[in-house]
Image (cartoon, rainbow, N blue to C red):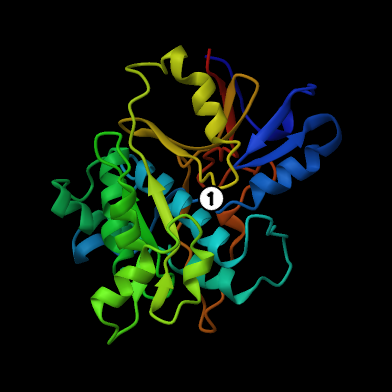
Amino acid sequence: MESVDYLEDLPETDEPAWILGRQHHLKTEKSKLLSDIGSRLWFTYRRKFSPIGGTGPSSDAGWGCMLRCGQMMLAQALICQHLGRDWQWEEYKKQPEEYKKILCCFLDRKDCCYSIHQMAQMGVGEGKSIGEWFGPNTVAQVLKKLALFDEWNSLAVYVSMDNTVVIEDIKKMCWAPLQGCPRSHCSSLSYRSSINPAKTSGAPGGSWKPLLLIVPLRLGINHINPVYVDAFKECFKMPQSLGALGGKPNNAYYFIGFLGNELIYLDPHTTQVFVDSDESGAVDDHSFHCQQAPPPDEDNEPRSLGSIRILL
């Protein structure tokens, strides 16, 4: 398959590019496209963090790529929840407090709710050893479990089983009754507006949780089956789209859009040094975004911004 190393090298074409529900025309909006992609949180392999579990690995290079892709998808969900889809990251500009809190959820520390430490250790319950590669379904199950302990975001994560989405289960998961609210009363409120949660969010009996819906699918064996291509591309046009996790063992990507018959993705296969917050809680976030072709790091390892690969 052909590939383009950096997004600045995208061909000028009349076809629009779609990124997570937003359309961009390359001939007139290339800078907006790059800014949109650069605003997504980019999580890659890291090294020199504290050993997982106290005695485990201090780097996830070679095995953590799907975990990083899961972090990127969840981070995008939290950005949409707290900042909105149209929020843009600007270098050296003061960021909202919500952005800082979101980023801190994913730092490589055991006390951060969606850190590589928490995900790897939660994976043990899914039959995965620490340091073992996770498939996309396992990552989805891990995120679902970790979200239960995340009080700040209060996000419901639903993972469909056997390609089936059960609406009644989603209603029960997303409706959060207030303490002391009789279950029978709260149930009647929750079913009153299943499609329009805004009507229930202000109801006296409770509130509606934001939903992250994950649908595990196999679209092919070694390559995507052409019969699924058009439908898959349409998913990236949905305004609620959070992209897709995909790949094969030790080769996972976070797909965020497409151009023609090519997918645009963020690549986690770059090993960067662990970044922690300072005493004030601030984080140097430059390595968590890609806006331009970056230079090699101190070990002369090339850092990939994002690529496109031909689907058909």
Name the amino acid, label 1. Trp
- To which quarter of the image does residue 264 belong? top right
Crowd band around label 1 with a 10 angstrom C-alpha radius: few (<14), some (14–19), many (20+) = many
Left or right side of 108 for 25: right
Q: Is residue 100 left or right of residue 155?
A: right
> Count of labels shown?
1
> Residue 63 in the image: x percent, y percent?
30, 41
Task: Tell me if residue 146 comes above or below residue 6 in the rendering.
Answer: below
Q: Quadrant of residue 100?
A: bottom right
Residue beneath the point at 57% across and 58% down: 80
Dot 1 falls on a residue whose secondary structure is loop
**Looking at the image, which residue sits at the far right?**
28
Q: Nearer the viewer, residue 111 or 173?
A: 173
Measured as percent of width and height from the top left, residue 202 is found at 50, 76
In the image: residue 32, left or right of residue 295: right
Q: Which residue is mark 1?
A: 42
Residue at the image position 73 percent from the left and 66 percent from the top: 92
**Most distant residue in the bottom direction:** 180
- Expressed as whole percent of the image width and height from the top left, the position of residue 102 reads 50, 67
Residue 249 appears in view: yes
The front one of 227 and 169 is 169
In depth, the one of 96 and 307 nearer the eye is 96
Vertically, is 259 above or below 133? Answer: above
- Residue name at image x 62 percent, y 58 percent: 286
Task: Evaluate whether residue 109 shows in this view.
Answer: no
Answer above or below: position of 71 versus 296: below
Q: Residue at x 34, y 45 (%)?
A: 64
